[in-house]
Amino acid sequence: MKYTYFSGLKAGKYLIRSQFWYNRRSCCTFFPRNPLSCVLSKPVGFLDKLEWYWCDKNNELKSMSHYLDTRDKLASSHYDENWYPIKDHKGRHLRPKYDWVTHENFWGAFDEFMSRDIITNPFILFGYTTNAGTGKLVRDIKTKKPNVKPHPNLLPELRKRKNIVVYKENIEHLAYNIYAGVDTGPTHEKKTQFLNDLIMFQKLMPSILESYDIPYEMFSLDSGSYSKTFDLDKVLPRDSSDKLFVHDIDVRQQVSDFMMSYASNV
């Protein structure tokens, strides 16, 4: 069975990729913003073959590959979805996204994308390149105005997969992840708006898939069974990545204030 993981941001995508690496399964991770790009992985012996796809400034589909031993990298923030095997001019392993563009030629690798056991950030496949879970993405989806036309075989292929819509039951934990985990640059007000957008988006996702006649199952990030839902022989602890992408700052008051406001509006 092949899976598609529909979610907003701060929704366990790093953990589910690590779960699939741990079980020697293949992955496709789209980057939830411009430009269109992705990284694929599949097991080759005890290594994983990673492949990046993008379009260059001439709109030509490009790719490169790298072999990586993932066994000791399942709980390392260094190997997040932005990791790239070639260092930039500052010595960081970051995707050179500023040299890439969004173009429909990206769908030339569509069959490779769909061959993977799990796909994360799949709203990219619909042509929406706005950050997952933001207000702008919600508006674009409601009006069905993607940034780029999707592949013509997208809906039939998605209907063959097990589509999982993930959500947070523990809103307090989600609030902590946003206030402590989002880059320290945004203001408190922007983080709060981002959090409200994410909560709205996770409620909206089922109706989005229904509008495309795509079957789906719901999965709670707080209480769902990874082994049962994703047919995994072994699983990493649910909190494996909890501390990887948060800052060491005290946000208890911000979380408390948000929860009071949230409770009054439920």
Image (spheres, rainbow, N blue to C red):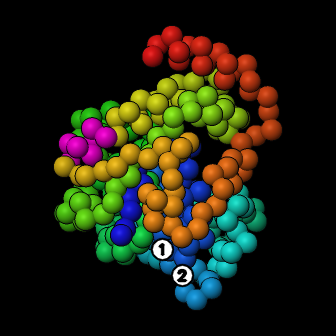
On screen, residue 126 above or below 37: above
The mark that comes first in sequence, 2 or 1, is 1
Q: Going 51% across and 57% down the picture, which residue do you hit? A: 226
Nearer the observer, 166 or 123 = 166
Snapshot quadrant of residue 207: top left
Q: Is residue 235 left or right of residue 93?
A: left
Query: CA gap, disc 2 to disc 1?
Result: 7 Å
Residue identifier under label 1: 26
User: Where in the figure is residue 211, as x and y percent of width and height?
Assistant: 20, 42
| Mark number, residue 69 | none
The image quadrant where one finds the N terminus is bottom left
Q: Is residue 14 left or right of residue 210?
A: right
Q: Are marks 2 and 1 in contact (CB under 8 Å)?
A: yes
Q: What are the residue bounds of the magenta stretch?
A: 206-212
| Mark number, residue 43 | 2
Residue 77 seen: yes
User: Where in the figure is residue 208, as x and y percent of width and height?
Assistant: 28, 41
| Residue 154 colored in magenta in the image | no
Q: Is residue 119 left or right of residue 190?
A: left
